[in-house]
Image: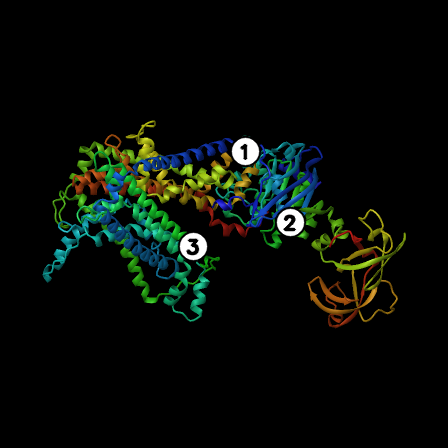
Amino acid sequence: MTDTVEKPVGVRPDEVHIRTRRYKRSRSPFGIAALILAVVVILLIVYPGGAMGARLASAFTSHSLADVFGASWFPGMIRDTVVVVGLSALIAVIIAAVLAWVNERTDARFRFSGVLPLVPLFIPTIAVGIGWVVLGDPTVGFLNGILKVILAPFHIAPTVNIYSYPGMIFLYVLCLVPYAYLPISAGFRNLDPSLEEASRTSGAGPWKALRTVSLPAIAPALVAGFVLVLIVGLSLYSIPVVIEDRPQIDIISVRIINAIRASYPPAYDVAILLSLVLLVVLVIVWLIQKRINRGGRFALSGARSAGSALTKLGAGRWVFRVIVIVYGLLSTVFPLAALIIVSFQSYWHADVFVGPWGILNYQQILFNDPIAVTAVKNSLVLGIVGGAITVLIAAILVIYARNKRDRIGRIADTVSKVPAAVPHAVLAVAFIFAFGGPPFNLGGTLLILGLAYFVTYLPYVSIAIEPSILAIHPSLEEASVMSGAGAGRTFRKIILPMAIPGVFAAWALVFVRVISDLEVSVLLGTGSTPVVGFVMLDVYDQGSVGIVATLALFMTVITAVVILIMLRLGQPRWRRSRPLKAARRTKPAR
Amino acid sequence: MAQKAETAATGIIPSARTPERLEISNLSKGFRRSGGDLVGAVSNIDLTVSSGEIVVLLGPSGCGKSTLLRCIAGLEEPDDGRIEIDGRVAFDSSRDFMASPDKRNVSMMFQSYALWPHMTLRENVAYPLITRGTAKVAARKKADDYLELVGLAGLGQQYPGSISGGQQQRVALARTLVSDPSVVLFDEPLSNVDAKVRVQLRRELLRIHAELGFAAIYVTHDQDEAMGIGNRIAVMREGQIVQLAPPVSVYEYPSTRYSAEFVGAANMIDATLVSSTASDVTFTSALGEITAKPETVWAGHSSVPAPGTDVVLMVRPEYCGLAEGAPADRGTANVWEADIDGSLYAGSRTEFRCTAGGISLSAWVVGSPAGLQKATRGSFSIPPSAVRAIEIGAATND
């Protein structure tokens, strides 16, 4: 995006403006504000990075190195992490590719099939995790209860056990699919359908066309999806933290957080060295991706011809519809249903159809647990207010980087995307070092939580709103400037209103992320500044699954309501007048 | 009279200010290709636009006309030179000064209409007034007046998405003019609408210009549009103005081969001056002897060259004649026998391609002469008053 900034209209894309000198031009108040914001954002990211680096240097003692790399758990942890994350990333990419292909290129798609794979993004991951614990616990899991009833006449008693490698990988896959689905479906969407059609008219069947033409052509999207899934998978914490204890599967992200959270005094050196391992792996993955994409033999895109034919699957399309629906059931419907049921059980037991029922869990949270109530309040404030601020700042930075041929704007734009590649636990650790102690002493405040959320989720927000802002044709902005409006007015009156759908979608996204965040919340939250993630893990550690499930359900319902409101508000009013077009056109101008 | 009545009806009164609305001197701007070589988008431009005048920048894509327009608007930063708008400096490289676009009192109409879809037509048109501090009620009133002026009375509450492309462009015009800017900039405003609407809008634009008398720069690559709209046309090539003159002069007396060919079809004949007297000018060429009239052939040139000088002669094909059969008398001035290579029927005329004396020539004949279309040979004639000398001596390029 930065390299498109400077191309003036009417100039060939390979030409860029050269400046022989810089003219005195007074900065508008908006320009000054944007500059200050850009500097603040750069500092908020660079400073913790530096603090982490400084701390890292002191962590390189033979003692702490041996503590980590020489530890007996280290090889096992690497093995478990590689197996779980690697396998689930692979499976998630395959499933996402199938879902994306079905939805973008075949006639098997149906009304909501394109949205289904994305729904899990808007549900707190821990809700899915706990929902499946409730379903798949080997003794009191609902699935086992149901299976026992159904299979009783056959005298077989298979047991579903979510606390296992397959169980863990299954949950990882459920959570990772949406992340792979985004780039891969975009890849299929941008794929020139005439490539596929050419293969079909050359005598290839739908399968051969898919295998020989479509898949190789979207290879970069597949690679991008895989890399994204690896990054998310390696930093995923909410799934292993609810599963890993029982089967003793040792995942690095849990190790990092437990080094601080579950040991006294906090083993910062361990956390920091493990973070380094994670970062190195991510950098290597990123370099490999760059190398693969540099080949440039991927013929992508071309404008989609109008009414491009979808691959006809015949009766086979029902097979794919079932796959899409099953994914929707497993990732969303089943776990949420389990949460609802368990929240009304007086105590957790496997028999779904028999009481005793009650609202004990709700009473417990609402009346006996002031910390939980405060946590919900804190999370809501941070999610809504902090989210709004994040969206606003991200929007200003995107505009700033696009308009000003300003180095600081471009640096801010690039730097603000860096945290996307850093595991959240690592970010939180860096924030502890940077702002937890003197001179800032922000440890145990809501401010440090807010700042950490801001930095953590800023990249997601800028990536989410960037398209809707860049889609605003530059002439619309220029028309405003030519009408005598300054940069601030243009931003308020033209850009923000036009980017409304993107702005609200990004706000909804950051809200969900903040509400369902665990890593930052657990590391930076305290008993006096509780947030939902912090409280949920606390309660889970105490073993009250019913209450955790109720809390998770609470969060899911609240996020669903807030998201629906936001998406509703995000619908532009002016588009509703569109249908008039045909009627008006027949009327003579004068 | 009719115009005056309309002015009174819409309540819009043209303003009177200093005659020079825009003065550009020595303006340059370059772009660097990724390969590293410098491309002069605009170099050493001098241009003045007076009150009530429309100057058209005409040239192919990439000639720098849009860059020049955007430099005037303040959307591009020139490398060198000076721009003065209504007597106020907008850009001056010698003083390192550049005024931002919103401080220049120029307005611009964009190729893409650039209407804001989230605002009603009235809000769109009122916006330039509100940004400049006009009270809301007064701004709305004036916006309605201008919507009426462009023929969209009563549509103020509509959104841009609900009206046609031609109507959108009218709204864009109203928004461009509403703030009574010193200079109005048009960036190919009609190239997005279909041919019929374009002709209609061009007529409307001229009517409104006659009413309001604004000064304007109008960028286009369409020579018909340039001819119809401009008081003067600046033919641009590779970042420079090669000719700046009223439309008739540009078409009839092009100063260079480039502008001759850009504004219409042209026959080019290399020739050598034999003699030039007060009544006749004679050249020799591959065709043979060519006679011309001194008052037309030298128009636009400061002096008459010496006999023996090489020149390029230009004749518009619509002035050339083509008749069946060989010339009656081989000695008749400016008539030659020619091979007819082919013809192209273009409705109002038929365009014939001929060869005479080894030179390709073209003649446009009114209608569809059946005899000529079948013939392979004919007599090609050039009236002496249609001959123009456009390049004189070896010093000129091309």
Residue at mark 1: chain: B
Q: Amino acid at mark 1?
A: Thr
Q: Residue at x 34, y 46 (%)?
A: A280
Residue at mark 3: chain: A
Q: Is residue A484 left or right of residue B247?
A: left
Viewer-side label of 1, 2? 2
Viewer-side label of 3, 1? 3
Q: Identify the element where label 1 is drawn.
A: helix
Question: Residue B148, can we see it?
Answer: no
Residue that carries the numbered disc 3 in the rendered image: A293
Task: Tell me how the rendering is colored.
Answer: rainbow
Q: CA distance from mark 3 to mark 1?
A: 47 Å
Residue B11 image offset from top left, x and y in percent: 63, 35
Q: CA distance from mark 2 to mark 3?
A: 36 Å
Residue that carries the numbered disc 2 in the rendered image: B63
Q: Are marks 2 and 3 on the same chain?
A: no
Residue that carries the numbered disc 1 in the rendered image: B131
Does the residue at mark 2 contact the one at mark 3 (Cβ under 8 Å)? Answer: no
Residue A249 image offset from top left, x and y in percent: 21, 49
